[in-house]
Amino acid sequence: MGWKGVLVVGAALLLGAGYVSAEIITIDRELPQLEVLRKAYEAELKTAATQNDIEKIQEEYEQAKKNLSKFEGYAQKLSTLEEAKKKEIEVITAKYLKEQEKLDTATRKGIDDKYEKKIAELKNRDVAKTTSSYQAKLEKLEKELVGKNDLAGALVVQSERKKVSGAPVVPSPVLPGTAAAPVAVSEPPTAAVVANVSASAGGKGKDNQIHVNSVHGVAGAEGNISNNIYTFTLDSVGGQSKLVFYGYGNRSGNSYGRVYLIGPDRNRTEVARWRPDLLKGPNVSDFKSYTQVQPITADISSQVKQPGQYRVEFQYTDGDDALNIYRVEMQTR
């Protein structure tokens, strides 16, 4: 039975049991509406998603979430953001560098004002200036005593003036009928290390000079500046200059440190170091003379180029013992 027969039976069924008509419906063509629906359905089936398609796109979705940088347009947009960020950072950096420059300038000015004032105050109390003032007063007093015919007093003042200047004391001739006054001679200083030495024993030639300070100093804890600085005033300099110092620890030579030279130009240069293998000498309790101590020598020719005041600073850095400084020499020729 073909499809037409099926339709006839179907028609009978549609009429229901209440109908007794024996009419036969014959269908020999397709309905246009059904044909349209069928074609649309068949077209949709060609593009309809299967479960496999859904699972595949779900997997792509998960991978896309993990790889943002590969998503459409992401790289270009990120590059645009990075460029904008870079420009903003440059603007902010330039702003704060400008503010920092202002801060640095203001701070430097504050430092300059503070230390220029301190340096000016120190210059007013400079050892050489104080000594020169003292010598001028002594010279004035000496002339006043000579004017009063107090030759004994004048001789004492003259001896003091020459002692302060570093020149050997030679008594002035005593006029007939007057008695020579005793010349007071004091021991070298033993506590204040910051003392000017304008001249000392000369070398072999007349231009050779050995400036000596035999005051006992100590280069101990870091930051110590009370008794580890030696000041020398050089009236003239030669082509070659040396620094020589004699030092040793309290109980041993286990001591380390640096020696700096500060010239008239105020430049501070490291010129020497001490360490255990360079230190030989007796314990403090057995010390009798600097000749018992091995000297350490440094060539300072390149630093000593002009007359003026030079400071030698000893800075302890490490070891079991501080450095006892027994003698410091500046030699020029």
Image (tube, rainbow, N blue to C red):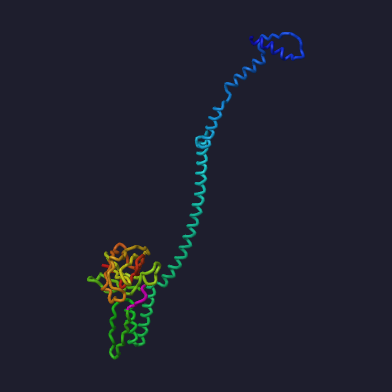
On the picture, is 300 further left or further right than 65? left
Res 332 → quadrant? bottom left
Bounds of the magenta segment: 188-193
- Rendered location of residue 119, percent (x, y): 43, 67
Q: Quadrant of the N terminus?
A: top right
Residue shown at 29% from the left, 63% from the top: 301
Residue 198 in the image: state x and y as whole percent: 32, 73
**Foreground of the two, 241 or 19:** 19
Membership of 26 in magenta stretch? no
* Residue 150, position as x, y percentages in the image: 34, 87
Q: Is residue 56 left or right of residue 265?
A: right
Q: Could you tell whether 121 is left or right of 161 in the image?
A: right
Q: For residue 302, what is the image quadrant?
A: bottom left
Dividing the picture into quadrants, the one containing residue 115 is bottom left
Residue 189 painted magenta:
yes
Name the dominant secondary structure of the magenta segment. Answer: loop
The C terminus: image quadrant: bottom left
The residue under the point 51% across, 50% down is 95
Residue 82 to residue 114: above or below: above
Judging depth in this view, the residue of 100 and 276 nearest the camera is 276
Viewer can see residue 301: yes
